[in-house]
C-alpha cells in the first residue's frame, strides 16, 4: 500500500492506495493544506466593454470555454439572472448575477478559454 496526500480546491485529503487499485480514505474530516497550490496562468487579457468596470465582480467558478453571452453592458439584472454560459466539461453552465444591478462590463468573448476565478463581468 502507498499513502498519498491529494489536494482538491485547497483541501488536502490523506488517501491510501492498495496494489489492487482500491482507494480508501479515513472517515475523518479533510485537513487544510499547509500552502495553497500555485495559481494557474492568468486568463487572457480582459476586454472591458464600454462603460468601464463595476464594483461587483462576476468570476468563473471553474475553468471552461465561454459558450454564450446572455446579457449586455447596460442591461438591468436581478440576482440569479444569467450573465453568460460557460461550457465546463461538456456541460453548459450558467454564470448568474450575484445581486441586483446593471451590467457594467463583459470581460470575455464567445470562444474564450477561462480559468477558475477569471473575471467574466462586472455589475454596478
Image: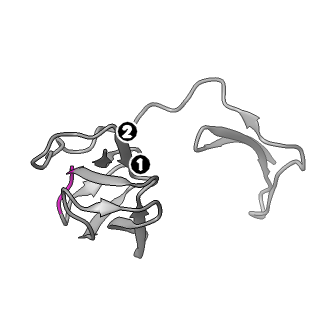
User: Mark 1 or 2 closer to N-term?
Assistant: 2
Residue drawn 77% across the image and 47% down it: 15
Q: Are marks 1 and 2 in contact (CB under 8 Å)?
A: yes
Dominant secondary structure of the residues highlighted in magenta in the image: loop
Q: Could you give the CA–CA distance between mark 1 and mark 2, rounded to whole angstroms?
A: 9 Å
Q: Position of residue 118 (x, y in %)?
A: 34, 45
Q: Is residue 107 magenta?
A: yes
> Is residue 64 or residue 94 the one in the foreground?
94
Q: Secondary structure at mark 2?
A: loop
| Residue denoted by label 1 | 116
Q: Residues within 10 Å of mark 1 (few under 14, many from 20)?
A: some
Q: Which residues are magenta?
A: 105-109
Q: Which image quarter: residue 11? A: top right
Residue drawn 18% across the image and 57% down it: 73
In the rendered image, the vertical position of residue 46 relative to residue 62, given as above or below: above
Q: Position of residue 34 (x, y in %)?
A: 66, 24
The residue furthest top is 34
Q: Nearer the viewer, mark 1 or mark 2?
A: 1
Amino acid at each position: 500500500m502507498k499513502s498519498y496526500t491529494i489536494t482538491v480546491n485547497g483541501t488536502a485529503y490523506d488517501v491510501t492506495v492498495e496494489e489492487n487499485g482500491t482507494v480508501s480514505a479515513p472517515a475523518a474530516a479533510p485537513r487544510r493544506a499547509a500552502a495553497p497550490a500555485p495559481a494557474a496562468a492568468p486568463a487572457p487579457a480582459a476586454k472591458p466593454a464600454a462603460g468601464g468596470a463595476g464594483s461587483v465582480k462576476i468570476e468563473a467558478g471553474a475553468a471552461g470555454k465561454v459558450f454564450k453571452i446572455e446579457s449586455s453592458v447596460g442591461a438591468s439584472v436581478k440576482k440569479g439572472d444569467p450573465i453568460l454560459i460557460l461550457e465546463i466539461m461538456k456541460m453548459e453552465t450558467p454564470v448568474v448575477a450575484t445581486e441586483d444591478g446593471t451590467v457594467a462590463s463583459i470581460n470575455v468573448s464567445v470562444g474564450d478559454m477561462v480559468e477558475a476565478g477569471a473575471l467574466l463581468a462586472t455589475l454596478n
